[in-house]
Amino acid sequence: MGIVWLIIVGAAAGFLATRFMDMETNVITTVAIGIGGALMGGLLLGLLKGLLGMAAGFVGALLGAVLLIWIWQTYFS
C-alpha cells in the first residue's frame, strides 16, 4: 500500500508542481518528478509528517517536487 500511495501522491504533487513552475512534461516525467519530490519532501519534512499526518506528507511532496523542478531548470536546462 505504501508504494501505491507514493505513486498517487507523487503524481498529484508532480502535476501541481509542473503547473506552478510552468513546465511542460509528459505523464511519466510528471510522475517521476512527483515521486522524486515526495522522497525529497519526506526527508525534509519528516518531523512535520509525524506531527500533522498525511496533509504534511502532501505539502512535503509538493515542495520537494517544486524544488526538484527548480534544480532541473537551474542546472540541467
Image (cartoon, rainbow, N blue to C red):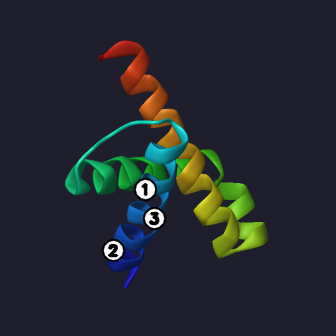
Please tell me how crowded label 2 is: few (under 14), some (14-19), or many (20+) other residues with Cα within 10 Å.
few
Q: Position of residue 26 (x, y in %)?
A: 22, 49
Vertical side of 65 occupied by 56: above or below: below
Could you tell me if residue 40 is visible in this image?
no
The dot on residue 72 is none
Residue at 21% x, 55% y is 28
Please tell me how crowded label 3 is: few (under 14), some (14-19), or many (20+) other residues with Cα within 10 Å.
some
Figure quadrant of residue 73:
top left
Residue at 64% x, 57% y is 59
Label 3: state its secondary structure.
helix
The reply to whether discs 1 and 3 touch (Cβ–Cβ < 8 Å) is yes
The dot on residue 15 is 1
The reply to whether discs 1 and 2 touch (Cβ–Cβ < 8 Å) is no
Q: Amino acid at mark 2?
A: Ile
Where is mark 3, residue-wise? 12
Q: Position of residue 21 (x, y in %)?
A: 50, 36
Which quadrant is the C terminus positioned in? top left
Find the distance from the CA under tag 2 to the CA under tag 3. 14 Å
Q: Horizontal placement of 16 versus 36: left or right?
A: right
Mark sitting earlier along the chain (2/3): 2
The reply to whether discs 2 and 3 touch (Cβ–Cβ < 8 Å) is no
Vertical side of 5 occupied by 37: above or below: above
Which quadrant is the N terminus positioned in? bottom left
Vertical side of 33 occupied by 27: above or below: below
Q: Horizontal placement of 55 versus 77: left or right?
A: right
Where is mark 2, residue-wise? 3
Which of the two marks, 2 or 3, is nearer to us in this view?
A: 3
